Image (cartoon, helix red, strand yellow):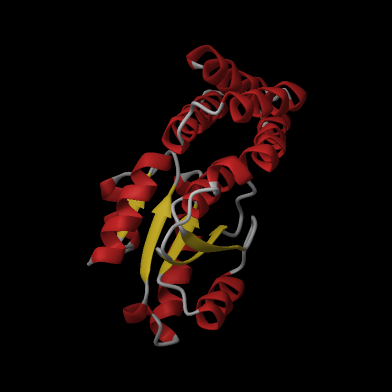
């Protein structure tokens, strides 16, 4: 099983959607991998792809191929990941902020959140402040997850936080920012309640915020 999971991770990194889908089916049929095992491999793949983009080894086309490999694999894996019944963990609104079209990390994390019992409203990529605010109001979300791949998205994050304050919504929701470039210092500068850099830390901070 370990070999299958490692090959699955590599297929995503290489953007081989046919291979990632076939290996996802093999994982389901073998039935030995836990949701945590699968999410760990997805997280590692996301970190590798993000790292290669930052160093200039990967560009937008490579990112999109990896995102497609994830999307097609998750169509196979989601029924397997979600077969265990969960109590409702909370309501989440998530999207990639304005000016950012990266979705591989967002899509992986949304799948992990759903598997953990969260009701997730996915707003997509390049999401405007207005769309975030409207979704928070309409869904009564407990958590707002803002995916922002690079620190250049800081103005968009600041705009969303400011609008939440203006609309009287800030005290009713916990805001978490996420992305490979995020750090405690960056989170403090933006004013979010928490930050995450991968699947494991996202699940941990969401759990902590829901318990607060």
Q: Where is residue 121 in the image (x, y as percent from the top left)?
A: 58, 65
Q: Which residue lies furthest to the right in this view?
A: 18
To which quarter of the image does residue 21 belong? Answer: top right
Rendered residue at 48%/55% (across/down): 85
Is residue 81 visible in the rendered structure shown here?
Answer: yes
Is residue 103 visible in the rendered structure shown here?
Answer: no
Q: Where is residue 92 in the image (x, y as percent from the top left)?
A: 48, 65
Q: Position of residue 163 (x, y in %)?
A: 46, 78
Q: Position of residue 4 (x, y in %)?
A: 57, 16
Is residue 77 depicted above or below 210 in this figure?
A: above
Rendered residue at 40%/63% (across/down): 89
Numbered label tally: 0
The residue lying toward the viewer, choosing from 43 and 82, is: 82
The residue lying toward the viewer, choosing from 74 and 66, is: 74
Q: Which residue lies furthest to the top in this view?
A: 3
Rendered residue at 25%/64% (across/down): 211
Rendered residue at 68%/38% (across/down): 76
Is residue 21 depicted above or below 72 in this figure?
A: above
Is residue 9 depicted above or below 139 in this figure?
A: above
Is residue 174 depicted above or below 42 in this figure?
A: below
């Amino acid at each position: 099983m370990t070999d299958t999971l490692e090959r699955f991770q590599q297929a995503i990194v290489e953007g081989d959607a046919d291979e990632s889908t076939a290996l996802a089916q093999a994982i389901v049929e073998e039935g030995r991998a836990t949701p945590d095992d699968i999410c760990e491999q997805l997280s590692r793949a996301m970190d590798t792809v993000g790292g290669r983009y930052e160093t200039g080894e990967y560009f937008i086309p490579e990112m999109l191929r990896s995102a497609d490999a994830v999307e097609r694999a998750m169509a196979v894996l989601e029924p397997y990941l979600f077969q265990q019944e969960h109590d409702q963990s909370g309501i989440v609104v998530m999207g990639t902020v304005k000016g950012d079209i990266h979705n591989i990390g967002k899509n992986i994390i949304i799948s992990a959140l759903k598997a953990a019992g969260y009701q997730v409203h996915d707003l997509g990529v390049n999401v405007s402040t207005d769309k975030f605010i409207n979704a928070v109001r309409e869904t009564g979300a407990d958590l707002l997850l803002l995916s922002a791949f690079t620190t250049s998205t800081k103005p968009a994050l600041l705009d969303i936080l400011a609008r939440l304050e203006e609309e009287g919504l800030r005290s009713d929701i916990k805001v978490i920012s996420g992305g490979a470039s995020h750090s405690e210092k960056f989170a403090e500068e933006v004013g979010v309640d928490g930050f995450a850099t991968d699947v494991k830390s996202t699940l941990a901070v969401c759990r902590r915020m829901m318990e607060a």
